[in-house]
Amino acid sequence: MADQKMKPIWYFVGLILMAMGGLIVLSGIYQLFNPPAVTTVLAQTHPDIWWGGIMMLFGGTMYLKTRK
């Protein structure tokens, strides 16, 4: 038990970003196939898929760098 190290905060931040990004991507994919009745001006660019992917990528990078 004495050899165990504490995980840095960035480990958990990476996990949270990956989870939130995954949920945003899933909601974007859902809205891709079932568009809402009222859309915004730039809805055709699907920003939720882009930003969810960026969050997952950044969270995965943070997770992999601090998982030691």
Image: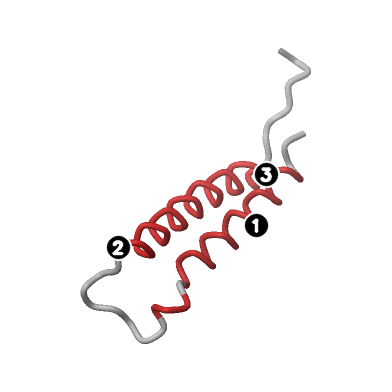
Camera-side residue: 23 or 17? 23
Camera-side residue: 58 or 43? 43
Nearer the camera: disc 1 or disc 2: 2
- Dot 2 or dot 3, earlier in sequence: 2
Q: Which residue is mark 1?
A: 58
Say which mark, if any, is on residue 45: none
What's the amino acid at mark 1?
Answer: Phe
Q: Identify the residue at image location x=57%, y=60%.
A: 53
Q: Mark 1 falls on what kind of element? A: helix
- Dot 1 or dot 3, earlier in sequence: 1
Q: Which residue is mark 3?
A: 63
- Dot 1 or dot 2, earlier in sequence: 2
Is 2 on the left or on the right of 12, as rendered?
A: right
- When the figure is inspected, residue 17 is found, relative to residue 2, above or below; the finding is below
C-alpha span from label 2 to label 3: 33 Å
Camera-side residue: 64 or 6? 64
Q: Which residue is mark 2?
A: 34
